[in-house]
Image: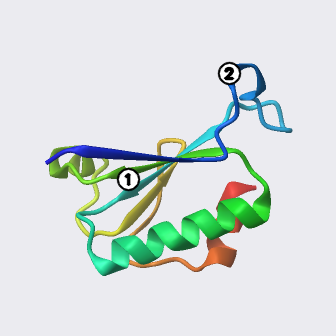
Amino acid sequence: MFLLKSRLQVAPAEESVRADGCETMKIEILGTGCPKCKKLEENVRKAVEESGEKAEIVKVTDIAKIIEYGVMSTPALVIDGEVKSSGKIPDVKEIKGWLE
């Protein structure tokens, strides 16, 4: 297994602080690349775009890394190290709520 990285709206280092003073958020999509995982990624990208937040989006396919989060069902969504959902595809509105 390997780790795939994909970035969206990543600001240069000097601009990596969000409006609330925090650094750019890190969003991880945990899964093996199944259709549900791809749909979750699509929803995440749309939510980030609509919210205007700056985020690094990382797709994690390494089973060992997924298990480290305690996730037993994919797809899963992790925002800044916190598992927000597992085993389901949250809609764009729900994801946007987590980004605020």
SS for callout 2: helix
The spot of residue 5 in percent (x, y) is 39, 44
Three-letter amino acid code at the position of disc 2: Ala
Q: Which residue is pictured at 36% across the width and 71% down the height?
A: 37
The answer to whether 21 is drawn above or below residue 66 in the figure is above
What quarter of the picture does the C terminus occupy? bottom right
- Between residues 59 and 74, which one lies in front from this camera angle? 59
- Between residues 63 and 68, which one lies in front from this camera angle? 63
The spot of residue 24 in percent (x, y) is 66, 36
| Circle 2 crowding by C-alpha within 10 Å: few under 14, some 14–19, many from 20 | few
| Circle 1 crowding by C-alpha within 10 Å: few under 14, some 14–19, many from 20 | many
Displayed quadrant of residue 16: top right
Cα distance in 3D space between marks 1 and 2: 21 Å
SS for callout 1: strand
The spot of residue 73 in percent (x, y) is 26, 69
* Residue 40 as seen in the image, left or right of residue 99: left
Q: Name the residue under label 1.
A: 59
| The furthest residue to the top | 14
The spot of residue 67 in percent (x, y) is 21, 50
Q: Name the residue under label 2.
A: 13
* Residue 48 as seen in the image, left or right of residue 19: left
The answer to whether 33 is drawn above or below residue 17 in the figure is below
| The furthest residue to the right | 19
Three-letter amino acid code at the position of disc 1: Lys
Q: Which residue is pictured at 29% across the width and 69% down the height?
A: 74
Does the CB distance between marks 1 and 2 fall below 8 Å?
no
- Between residues 44 and 98, which one lies in front from this camera angle? 44
**Residue 87 seen from this side:** no
Mark number displayed over residue 78: none
Q: Which residue is pictured at 77% across the width and 27% down the height?
A: 15
Displayed quadrant of residue 97: bottom right
